[in-house]
Image (tube, rainbow, N blue to C red):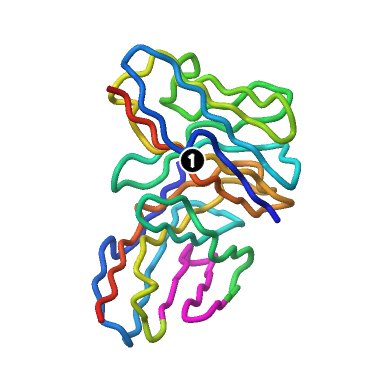
Amino acid sequence: GAVVSQHPSWVICKSGTSVKIECRSLDFQATTMFWYRQFPKQSLMLMATSNEGSKATYEQGVEKDKFLINHASLTLSTLTVTSAHPEDSSFYICSARVGGVEQFFGPGTRLTVL
Amino acid sequence: ELKVEQNPLFLSMQEGKNYTIYCNYSTTSDRLYWYRQDPGKSLESLFVLLSNGAVKQEGRLMASLDTKARLSTLHITAAVHDLSATYFCAVGRSGGGADGLTFGKGTHLIIQP
């Protein structure tokens, strides 16, 4: 149980285009999901908290107009990177909270912006 | 602002040896997590520690938590090559599990035969 999937697993796009990443909880309902970003050989940084049915909460320094988050259902959150640039190239990982404290992570999406 | 510091950041050790990774955090928290990450992969949950004095063990890994010292340790016993990976500790920022996690920089562990 507690499986989190992400799609796509990797994507290459041209600078200036938008990319949507999906995060799904497969066997449970997640009222809260989290989006993290990990640059090569670095740690994970929390970008935003995604709440079903309400606006996402963004961390300081994360542009909400650039990283659009939608949590339309209890099993799906999406992250759209708008007008992507090479500096947005990173590993994007979502997690979902299960029960009280456990968090399970998706497999990640590797974004490369040319 | 919550800060999480891990040390060492890089560790090369031989099979059969024991070692400990340390995780210090700066503010009170009720949740401490340990994760493993293999190259190019996402995170695998190892332990969740919720109370002072908590100790959990799985195979050759054992984690403990001292909330008064704001310190957690991940101890590796008789290391084997398969344990080579990057290990992260992470701390929840507030009670109830509602917040995302703040991660340490990770410990890149290489275990040599």
Using residue A22 as the reference point, say whether residue B19 is left or right of it: left
Percent of width and height locating residue A58: 53, 27
- Toward the viewer: A59 or A38? A38
Percent of width and height locating residue B9: 28, 60
In the image, is residue B95 above or below residue B75?
Answer: above
In the image, is residue A28 above or below residue A90?
Answer: below
- Whether B58 is among the magenta residues is yes
Task: Write the residue at 36% across / 21% down.
Answer: A13
Q: Which residue is mark 1?
A: A93
Which of the chains bears the disc numbered 1? A
- Toward the viewer: B87 or A85? A85
Give the quarter of the figure containing the N terminus of chain A. Answer: bottom right
- Toward the viewer: B92 or B66? B92
Give the quarter of the figure containing the C terminus of chain A. Answer: top left
* Mark 1, other Cα within 10 Å: few <14 / some 14–19 / many ≥20: many
Task: Write the residue at 60% across / 69% down.
Answer: B52
Which secondary structure type mostly characterizes the magenta part of the structure? Answer: strand
Q: What kind of element bears circle 1?
A: strand
- Toward the viewer: B25 or B104? B104
In the image, is residue A103 above or below residue B70?
Answer: above
Task: Write the residue at 48% across / 77% down.
Answer: B61
Using residue B43 as the reference point, say whether residue B8 is left or right of it: left
Percent of width and height locating residue B60: 47, 81
Residue type at mark 1 is Ile
- Whether A5 is among the magenta residues is no
Task: Write the residue at 73% across / 24% down.
Answer: A53
Stretch of the chain drawn in magenta: B57-76
